[in-house]
Amino acid sequence: MSAPAPPAPRPTPVRVDERAFSHRLARLDMRVSPYLFVAPFFLLFILVGLFPMAYTAVVSLHEWHLIGGQGEFVGLQNFADVLGQPRFLTAVRNTFSIFLLSSVPQIVAAIAIAAVLDQNIRAKTFWRMGVLLPYVVAPVAVSLIFSKIFADQSGLVNALLEAVGVSPVRWHADPLASHVAIATMVNFRWTGYNTLIFLAAMQAVPRDLYEAAIVDGASRLRTFFSVTVPMLRPTIIFVIIVSTIGGLQIFDEPRLFDQNGQGGADRQWMTLTMYLYELGWGPQKSFGRASAVAWLLFLIIVVVGLVNFVLTRRIATSGSAAGGRPHRRRAR
Amino acid sequence: MRTSTRPRLAVAAGTAAVALVAAGCSSSSTAASDESGDGEVTLTVATFNEFGYEELFDQYMEENPNVTIVHRKAATSNEARDNLTTRLAAGSGLADIEAVEVDWLPELMQYSDQFVDLSDPELEGRWLDWKAAQATTPDGQLIGYGTDIGPEAICYRSDLFEAAGLPTDRAEVADLLGTSWEDYFAAGEQFSAQSEVPWFDSAQAIYQGMINQVENAYEESDGTPIPLADNTEVQDLYEQVLAAGVDDGLSARLAQWSEDWTNAFQNDGFATMLCPAWMLGVIEGNAAGVEGWDVANTFPNGGGNWGGSFLTVPTQSENPEAAQALAAWLTAPEQQLVAFQSKGTFPSQVEALDSEELAGLSNAFFNDAPTGEIFADRAAAVEVAPFKGPNYFAIHQIVSDAITRVEVSQTDDAASSWTKAEQAYDELGLS
């Protein structure tokens, strides 16, 4: 980091002291300043990340009312209460269902769209900005638009279905149908964003790899699966981890899916974060139980994140071992 | 020399950054204080939706030059409620006057020591008895001054009535609809024999009207919750409303405020609905261009009230006396009549209800119905002030959900949905 000390000609004894001091400062600089530079982030993180997490853990061990505040210490009672409520399992089911219905198609579509945008097409910038447009729309606005599209009796989708003779889908009654509708909103918003991330990664793939593939006589499809996808591995892992975190915390879209925001009369589309909100701010006003759900959600995300990480590494590694590596070796 | 300045700079920059963060944390604690010498007071008033107070604030400031009023207006009542509960819990940040909805009161009553006792012998008898009772704690503390109310009548489509061979005149319709829920449902049977159109919009809304006439719906008067499994009164109403709405097909099976419900106004979705005074504006907005809406001066089983607000003064206020004076002035009959004319909030003050101005009021959209007179009558007909304790809305939500499951989402029948409701009640962990 620090520049080597300039060669000083024959120092007098006094200057030796000075030099020793400045030398020590320089070493201090090397050792300490990097930490100082990153310190603001970690201080902020401790303040708004770590501290709330620890505090949530404390709250989850107490009776804690929204207005009334701290009550008795109850140990793990809140966790037991929450795990004993069938609604917790409903919320877990809904969360995972919506997460899978949104993340999987989203990532597949994003890679496909990015591959198309990576080709030599006209008006590149226009198309690239175009896919990002839905991301600019606020989630609340998205929900408003889609609530008109997915209304049970007067909605656009059902009108189209009826026009082609299919019986209308009960979007606000059937759990799976409601999950599909909500996942559609999520996909609408996030596919373009992920597309751009994949596109950026694709453009970083060395072009000589493609040239080598062409020389080897690989088809376009083969090139895509054997060169592009393996080279995207770190990006795919990143996107999957990020969408796992976001997907399991989904709140806006399901909450705005109907006028009550509770996830339906039978909690058909109540996600974990909505359940948390209902416990803390709803009729029970129990921050203790809400905090217990927050911690359970955190643990679930960590576990799912790790599983995803391991899985993607495996899949991508085997993919690259099969196709990507040999090309690379030949290319270099 | 270059090498020796760099570390110092770096260290300085590092510490500066740290100091900046620290400063950022501490500076917010010195919020602007409203108090200054010579009797100058600044009062903040927090409202939501439309209270119709804008002109009144100007008038008050003109009459009281030492008072400056700052208006904080939340777009929705939910937003205002979140704000209120959060700052109440935090112990600071509330306005000098906080508007609250009647539905929040049971919960706020538990923290009545956070609110100034507004009771004042001079103001006794200003409001309808049941309105004042809503904001009075068991030990006699008045935590809010009443602003508006939502007395309920029945709105109907005279054109659809005519097509079904029923009377269309307001007074005759009132006779037809009768005085009990049975009469109202019987009139519905008569109507549906001649028409394809459902009789009312939502069984859940009808249930809302019914439960507001029960004195101790979900809790005893001392606040003890009545276990849902033993609550035969509620279960009877639940079965009655589902039998009429679902089994006899009187309901349009719409969830109120949903997209489908809003659109149903435009395509003859239903023939009648319970309408509190404030619902007239909603109907007029949703049914724009539809002719035939009218209001009948009747309500099954006596009167009913849905909604209404109060002005409270939190003890956090630095000028509680000045705030109380302003709240008292705003909720005086004269001022509420001004607010009513501005935004249609129906006054809760006895004197305002008897006034000429109110009596002379009619509504062109509802076939020139004398709405002022009708709703003043409806307000006078309210006899029961239902007890709403801290768990009222939690339990009410459970029963409402149970009705919606059968009526709208059709995921359950009446019996299985009731079982789920009992289970949800157990989850509340009240007993």
Image (spheres, coloured by chain):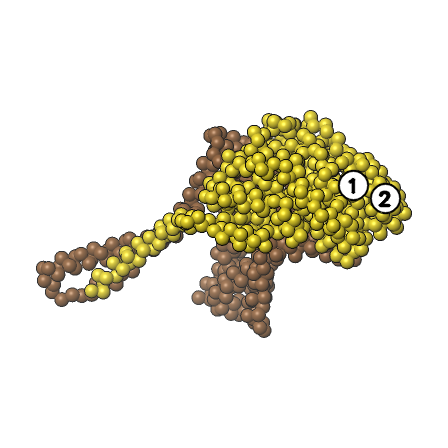
Residue B298 disc label = 1
Chain that is coloured brown in the picture:
A
Q: With A229 as the anchor, is B131 left or right in this view?
A: right
Drawn side of residue A275 relative to residue B291, left or right? left
From the viewer's side, name the closer residue of B162 and A60: B162
The picture places residue A228, in percent across and down from the top left corner, at 53, 62
Categorize mark 2 by other alpha carbons within 10 Å: few (<14), some (14-19), many (20+): few
Q: Horizontal and vertical percent for residue B214?
A: 70, 32
Q: Chain of mark 2?
A: B
Which chain letter goes with mark 1? B
Q: Secondary structure at mark 2?
A: helix
| Front one among B1 and B15 | B15
Q: Which residue is mark 2?
A: B172
| Position of residue A137 measured from the top left corner of the image (x, y, whole percent) | 58, 59
In this orientation, which residue lies closer to the viewer: B98 or A74?
A: B98
Identity of the residue drawn at 64% across and 39% down: B127
Residue A201, relative to residue B102: is it above or below? Answer: below
Type of the residue with mark 1: Thr
Determine the image quadrant of residue B11.
Answer: bottom left
Q: Identify the residue shown where x is 47% and y is 45%.
A: B93
Q: Is residue B274 visible?
A: no
